[in-house]
Structures are given as structure tokens and as C-alpha cells.
Amino acid sequence: LTPPLVAPSLLSADFSRAGEEAAAVEKAGADWLHLDVMDGHFVPNITFGPLMLQALRPHVKIPFDVHLMIQPVDLFLEPFVKAGANHLLVHIESGPHVYRTLQHIQALGAKPGIVLCPATPPEAISEVMGIVDIILVMTVNPGFGGQQFLPSQLEKIRKIREMIEKTGRDIRLMVDGGINHETAPLAVAAGADVIVAGTAVYGQKDYAEAIKRLKSFS
Ligand code: DX5
Ligand code: ZN
């Protein structure tokens, strides 16, 4: 198995020291920084907006992988790109005009990604496969860190990996939620190549050791 890229989720970091916490995982070997944006409407929790990204941007060089759990989403695409977002991931469940949203993200010069909640079947994204650079399969119900991995999502990861191979396009397949050193190998074996980890990185004392552990298995 090829070791996955690791994207620590800032959600589990100490928010009072957000800049240091972001820099610490970069130094520890993180590939991307995963930023969970929640609006208290699309998901039952509230985090932060573009101002937070703008404040963090000078502290890290790795790509900002921004998971938008907000509705409506379109008004905020440009502010997030201006604040330093490199990838903008939107939920297929976030509205009827997601294709337009993905086109808009591309036009702004960021990488568009699509996210599926646990209840959404893989076929739901078949018509956006030609435009996305990233697909994110949620392995928990979005809204909170520290939840349990849903093994029922492994079959969806396998199916989406097949869909990706059929396109011949270079699309990253991410997993997010309940990922640790035990569940990461399952997700990677099913076809994921990027793992998001909140608790499994920020909940540990040694971030470098935690990231190494998530990348090294056979
Ligand atoms: C949940 C978020 C995740 C969260 C994962 O809605 O999308 O990115 O931070 O946290 P863990 O890794 O602790 O499950
Ligand atoms: Zn996330």
C-alpha cells in the first residue's frame, strides 16, 4: 500500500494558539492543513470563517484544504480563496446547483472538491467526476471531531475508487472522520489516498510521531 497524504484537521487543535498549532503540524510532516468551516445551519456546530484563514496563512506553506459545511456556499467562495484557500470542498448535499459552485471554484483558481455525507450514495457524484480534483468521503456524520469511524463507508470508498479509475483523471480520494492508526489502513486499502485526522494528530502529544504512525503501515 502506498502511504497516504495526511491532512491534520485544525478542529481538534488549541484554538487559542491556532497559528502555532498550524505551524506545528507542518513541521511534523503534514501534507495539507484541513480546515473545517461550519455554520450552525448545514451542521449543528459553528467554527470559523475566512478571517481565520487569513490569520493562519502567514504561519504555514502547506495547502489549505477547506471543508465547507455551510449553506448557502456560493457567497463565500471568493472570500475563502482570497484568504488563502487552495482546495475548496463543498458538499453534494449543499444545494441543487453544486455544478455551478464547482465551476466557480475553478474560475477563482482553487481546486474544487466534492464531499459526500454517510447517507449519500456514490452515484450522487457521477455527474461531477469530470470537474473535481478531490473527492471526500465522510466516515462520520459531519459536525464534530472525535466521533467513531463508520465501517459502512468502506464499500463507498471502493466504488468511488473504481469511478475515478474509469475517468482516467487525476483525482484525490480523501476520508474524514474517526481516522486513526487502526482505521487509516482500512480506508487506504479501500482506495483512499489522503486521510484527514483531527484527534489522531492534535489529540496526541507528539505530532510528528502521530503523523508518521498514520503514514506507516503495510
Ligand atoms: C467533522 C470534520 C472532521 C473532523 C475529524 O465534521 O469534517 O474534519 O475534524 O475529526 P476526527 O479525526 O477527530 O474524527
Ligand atoms: Zn472535515
Image (tube, rainbow, N blue to C red):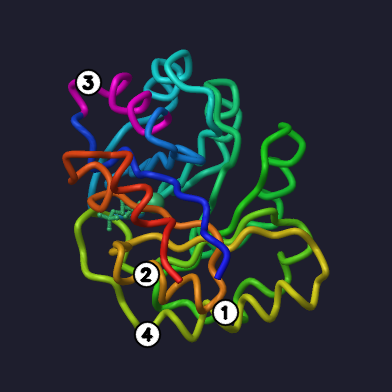
- Residue at the spot 74% in from the left edge and 41% down from the top edge: 106
Q: Considering only order in the chain, which callout, 2 or 1, is on the residue closer to the N terminus?
A: 1
Instruction: Name the quarter where the C terminus is drawn.
Output: bottom left
Image height of 28 relative to 113, above or below? above
Amino acid type at circle 1 is Pro
Return the residue at label 3: 17
Gap between marks 3 and 2 measured at Cα: 28 Å
> In screen coordinates, is 90 left or right of 133?
left
**Quadrant location of residue 187?**
bottom left
Gap between marks 3 and 4 measured at Cα: 36 Å
Q: Is mark 4 within 8 Å of ligand 1?
A: no
Amino acid type at circle 4 is Ser
Which secondary structure lies at badge 4? Answer: helix
The spot of residue 90 in percent (x, y) is 53, 52
Amino acid type at circle 2 is Thr
Return the residue at label 4: 152
Return the residue at label 1: 122
Gap between marks 1 and 2 measured at Cα: 13 Å
Q: Give me the disc on residue 139.
A: 2
Query: What secondary structure prevails in the magenta region?
Result: helix
The span picked out in magenta is 15-26
- Residue at the spot 40% in from the left edge and 39% down from the top edge: 35
Q: Nearer the viewer, residue 157 or 110?
A: 157
Q: Considering only order in the chain, which callout, 4 or 2, is on the residue closer to the N terminus?
A: 2
Image height of 171 relative to 16, above or below? below
Q: Is mark 2 within 8 Å of ligand 1?
A: yes
Badge 4: residue crowd in 10 Å (few <14, some 14–19, many ≥20): few
